[in-house]
Amino acid sequence: MPDAMTMKHVFPAIDLRNGEVVRLYQGDYDRQTTYGHDPVAQARRFERAGATWLHVVDLDGARTGEPTHRDTIADICANTELEVEVGGGVRNEATIDALLEVGVTRVVVGTAALKAWPWFESLVQEPRYRHKLVLGLDARDGHVATDGWEQTSDLTVVELAERIDGWPVAAIVYTDIATDGTLAGPNVAATAAVCDATDVPVVASGGVGSLDHLRELKPLPIQGAIVGRALYDQEFTLEEAIEAFAS
């Protein structure tokens, strides 16, 4: 298990669908809330509030395997100083290269890694991708979900976390689907189990609905936590979230 970081990052989230800023409830594409029509303006608001990282998901790409928001992501990178992490629909090297070329700091690979594991293993060893790829582990009842969360694997997230111990992967983004978008609290125990299974940094995702939820995550040796709906619903401010992790 890695040493606890002295500073944990809040990753405000922008989920993109049809060019809009949205959130899904428990990954259900039929239970969407739209929060804005200008993703670049939203990213700049997060930056002004103190964010240093931004987590972006191409929901259309996650579902179809064909990324559709590259231009929007390029605009975010060009118009902010944020470190941008992007996932959704990343299925091949061409997509990874295209995202890195427009200024993305690191790229989340989920479904493609799980369906073509030897490909992913060879990819992370390539010098140009070392510490630039993130493994997206999305869990339903502890098992890995793929294809925009519409399919569930027999593999557990802990098994996969153990498998990449020691690999030059930038991070694992661990999302508990049952908590995502609910504001009901993160799955702290499951997140801790992922941390225990690997030396790869872990970013927690799903369920953060209060500052106390962030405080519950803080003792874990995580790199940070992704926060989405709670910010859009004004449960707390990004400034307060950053302070909760810092204090």
Image (cartoon, rainbow, N blue to C red):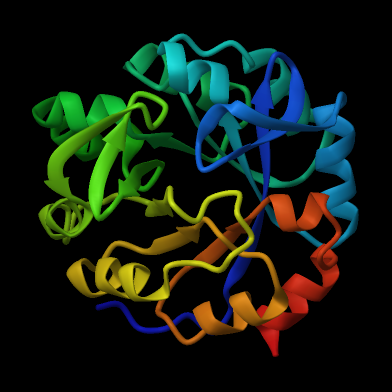
Task: Using the image, determine if residue 159 lies above or below residue 40.
Answer: below
Residue 246 figure quarter: bottom right
Q: Is residue 200 left or right of residue 44?
A: left
Vertical placement of residue 182 versus 59, above or below: below
* In front of the other: 125 or 15: 15
Q: Nearer the viewer, residue 109 or 193?
A: 193
Which of 96/24 is in front?
A: 24
Image quadrant in which the C terminus is located: bottom right
Q: Is residue 224 above or below residue 16?
A: below
Q: Nearer the viewer, residue 19 or 171?
A: 19
Q: Residue at x 90, y 34 (%)?
A: 41
Residue 151 in the image: x percent, y percent? 28, 28
Query: Residue, x 30% and y 77% (percent of image)?
Result: 2
Q: How many marks?
A: 0
* Lateral position of residue 84 relative to residue 157, left or right: right
Q: Position of residue 231 (x, y in %)?
A: 78, 56
Q: Residue at x 42, y 23 (%)?
A: 96
Q: Residue furthest bottom?
A: 247
Image quarter in which the N terminus is found = bottom left
Residue 49 place in picture, x, y as percent: 88, 60
Residue 91 appears at what percent x and percent y?
34, 18
Residue at image point 74% right, 58% down = 230
